Amino acid sequence: MIDYVQVHMGDDDGIEFFGGTTDIRHVVVSGAADDSLDWDEGWHGRAQFVIVHQHADESDNGIEADNLDSNNDSTPRSQPTIYNISLIGPNDELGEQRGAVLRRGTWGTLRNAIFMGFGKESVDLRDEATIAGIDSGVLAVESSIFFDIGSAGDEWFADEPTDGSDDDDDAGFVELDYFTATERSNSFGEDPMLVDPYNTTAPDFSPAEGSPVSQKAASPVDDGFFDTSAQFIGAIEPGGEDWTAGWTNFASE
């Protein structure tokens, strides 16, 4: 397991997994020049208490997730389980960043996430091999908060191309219908009230008093890895310890 790690202002992806079963906890990826959390080729790990903090200059997706490019149905298939993650975009309303791109056959479970500050859209599911995981129950994005997305702050999902460009061959799958379905337990437009999440040199990702992050949270899997007491959405417990304090560094150079 990888625990208590920060990757700050890297020139490419922050953390990328090429298969395997590595687990991560208490991880901060800040100012990555490309994607912040990236996985490919069958990653089957677990993650809890993760913060993605993107800057406005060269950053791309908060999460970019694939199975195998040459064979989207290759096994073992990428299928991580992630709880308690805060995905913070650069708060640039004209930016092209997405919170997460799930494509090329990846599956997985993502619960108790905050998506905020992304100029393009929150989540994009891109192909039929990925979409197939929804029907079979092995792909889920649930019990999460979506806030301050798109140029108007409430443009959760971008209009999709109809010509097959941008690797978006998802057979007409409509993200808005899926993510807003009652059984997903997702919240849209509700401010998670993080103290200072967009500050690039001295951020504070803690929820302020009165934050709604303790509502609609899913119970983490009781498998010996996940902290099942984390009954809240996002990476930091409201009123609890700020686990980023004292060891992270957000210097601009």
Image: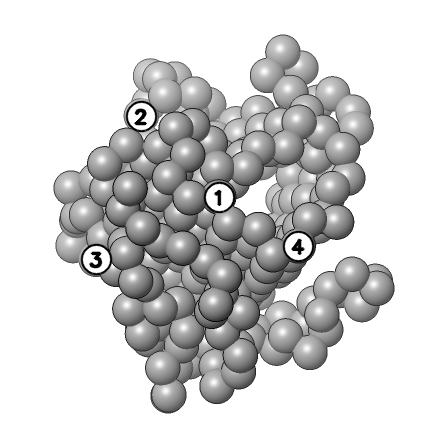
Where disc 4 sits, the SS reads strand
Assess whether mark 1 and mark 2 are in contact (beta carbons under 8 angstroms): no
Q: Is residue 3 left or right of residue 94?
A: right
At 60% from the left and 56% from the top, the residue drawn is 4
Where disc 3 sits, the SS reads loop
Q: CA distance from mark 4 to mark 2?
A: 39 Å
The residue that mark 3 highlights is 153
Q: Nearer the viewer, mark 4 or mark 2?
A: 4
Question: Which amino acid does the dot numbered 3 rest on?
Answer: Gly
Please identify the quarter of the rendering in which residue 70 is found.
top right
Q: Nearer the viewer, mark 3 or mark 1?
A: 1
Q: Nearer the viewer, mark 2 or mark 1?
A: 1
At 35% from the left and 68% from the top, the residue drawn is 204
Where disc 2 sits, the SS reads loop
The residue that mark 2 highlights is 161
At 27% from the left and 46% from the top, the residue drawn is 252
Question: Which amino acid does the dot numbered 4 rest on?
Answer: Asp
Q: CA distance from mark 3 to mark 4?
A: 33 Å
- Seen in the picture, residue 197 relative to 242 is either above or below; the reply is above
Q: CA distance from mark 2 to mark 3?
A: 21 Å
The residue that mark 1 highlights is 7
